[in-house]
Image (spheres, grey):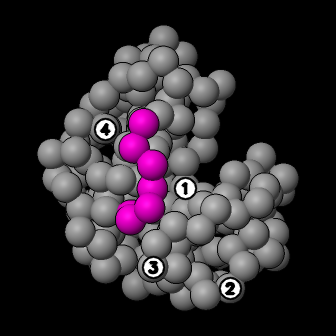
Amino acid sequence: MTARSAGDVRALMQAVGFTGVGETEALAEGWQVADFTGVGRRGLAALVRKTGAPAVMVSFLDSDVGFVEAATPDGRSWEALLNRDMAESYEIPVEQFPVEPAVDGALAWAAAAGLTPEEESVRRTLTGAAVFVEELSADLLVALGLLGARRS
């Protein structure tokens, strides 16, 4: 989970139902990153409401596939799939995660979050492949314009 908050994102995540929340890592401009093991169906929306700020979440399947969800307080949201080739091997219907609408959503979300995204980097990340999907997740944060995020 990556969210912007002046408060403790870990405590806020726990308050809205995230479980197994790890320590947070501070990025630039108030953004924080935290790992978690579980979240309810509306966890992201609840966190965005609680913080009043944008957030992006990636849920991982065996370090092979990443499910991306992002939202802003004004209701902008988007979703995407990371490591599409590997997702197909899990029989995940990749057609339910079209790339171009995800790129458009990511760019709009980043702009609403006050970030400066790199369109081609976002597209490359959403269509790329990696042995460990966490690498693509880190690349996506950088592509979205999150300062202080580590590029793999």
Please name which of the two marks, 3 or 1, marks the residue nearer to the observer: 3
Please name which of the two marks, 1 or 4, marks the residue nearer to the observer: 4
**Residue 147 x %, y %:** 38, 65
The kind of residue tagged 1 is Met
For label 1, the residue is: 57
Element type at mark 2: loop
Q: Start and end of the magenta stretch?
A: 146-152
For label 4, the residue is: 125
For label 3, the residue is: 29
Of mark 1 and mark 4, the one earlier in the sequence is 1
Name which residue lies at 36% across and 23% down.
129
**Residue 147 relative to residue 49: left or right:** left
Query: What whole-number distance in Å separates the C-alpha atoms at marks 4 and 3?
Result: 23 Å
The kind of residue tagged 2 is Gly
Q: Residues within 10 Å of mark 1 (few under 14, many from 20)?
A: many
Q: Is residue 51 magenta?
A: no
* Front residue (pair 77, 58): 58
Element type at mark 1: strand
Asked whether residue 93 is in view, the answer is no
